[in-house]
Amino acid sequence: MPGSKKALDLAVSIGETMLESGGEIYRVQETVGRILEAYGIRDYHVFVVTNGIFATVNERQEDAASMVRYVPIGEVNLQKIADMNQLSREICTGECGMAQAFQRLGRGRGSAQAPGLALALACGVGSAGFAYLLGARLVDSVVSFFLGMLLQAFLSLASNGRTSKFIVNIAGSALVTAGSLLLYWMGAGILYDKTIIGGIMRLMPGVALTTAIRELFDGDYLSGSIRLFDALLTGICIAIGVGAAIKACQLLGGGMLPLYETARDYNTALGVGGVCVQAAVAMAATMAFAVLFHVPKGEYPYCALNGALGWMAYIYCMERGMGPAISCMWAALALTLAARVLSAIRKMPGTVFLVTGIFTLVPGAGIYYASYYLIVGNLASFMEKGIEAFKIAGAIALGMIFGLALPQGWFNRLGKWVQRSHFQK
């Protein structure tokens, strides 16, 4: 049996990798505890917060050990979370020894990411797809594609320095807005609001919102509140960047910009053909964001299916007059349940499917329109759109909570049944 300090180092290092890659607090804490138990350590205390891990083992014995790790929040990397999750499973089942576990930990920390061009293309496809889903025409979607690529190039450059995340969000949203307005003034004939909404989807705090809700649901109110506040600040920064760019363009002689807001915030080209096209676009956009968040390649199709399911559920509810907030609640419930089913079948963290799927529902349009109305001085409409965006975010949270409330054992049994049926064939 390995020494307590070595076992603690391995467990905390795996937890550290998960936490810095966007893993939930409960998952990190549970993983560290299970690894320690796998090495025969029963006397341990593990406390995980948003940016730190505190752990002690065998506190009253001669081989007592303790560790504190500061973990700065890094880029979301679902591949690393999945790799560490699988490594911890194999440690717990005895399939992986400690020396091998340290080697795999080192490889997992340095796992290759998609090249910059692939990330730029993925961001472009995701931006174009979401713009189309939210009512853009083909030409507007093409513009959003190039704006998304421009934004990803900017984010890649900014990540090489130590620029504040909030400054990056403000500058990135301002860059997308300015680029769209420039094309509009050049006579491109675009619906600039749709191109902006599609372009800023990469910045939307879908990951922070998803993680916050899961942590609050698991009773970790401190970390959940921090993540939720981070999501709120990110939304405010995006609004500031969009609003500042619109105001600057007005002061430079652009005058009052027309508003193309429609009664419905989704593409109304329905019917059988229209629905099939929207489902395909939702799948492509979700898969593009799966690339951006470094999802394991084998899970791309399942992420895409979950995103399409959420969007189709949203449209179904909207067409029956339920309103944006209630529609988002039912859609979030549907994709949360689907994510848990896929997690059990694919032996992957549910976060892999949930984080990517939720992007079809985040209130990017509400943030944009609230910013626009604030800049033009229409405070009544600003309040209306701002409250609507908060209602949608709350409805998404409620749908996810309902989906997470069901016992995990149900999904585990379903996953085992599917696997048995697959192998029997």
Image: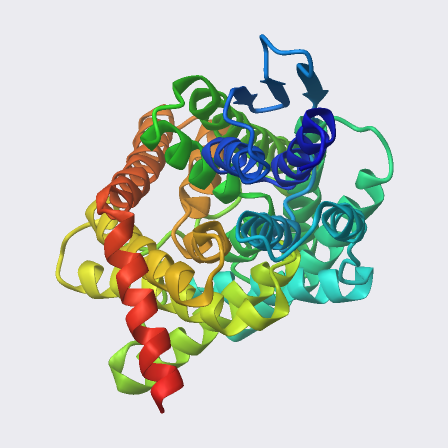
Residue 305 coordinates in the image, percent (x, y): 41, 71
Front residue of 63 and 378: 63
Residue 39 coordinates in the image, percent (x, y): 59, 37
Q: Residue at x 58, y 61 (%)?
A: 290
Front residue of 235 and 39: 39
Left or right of 185 on screen, residue 261: left
Q: Residue at x 51, y 31 (%)?
A: 29
Q: Quadrant of the N terminus?
A: top right
Q: Residue at x 51, y 20 (%)?
A: 43
Q: Residue at x 28, y 72 (%)?
A: 417
Q: How many numbered discs, if any?
A: 0
Residue 162 higher or lower than 308, as above or below: above
Left or right of 188 on screen, residue 227: left
Residue 371 coordinates in the image, percent (x, y): 49, 33
Residue 233 higher or lower than 373, as above or below: above
Res. 351 in view: yes
Front residue of 152 and 47: 47
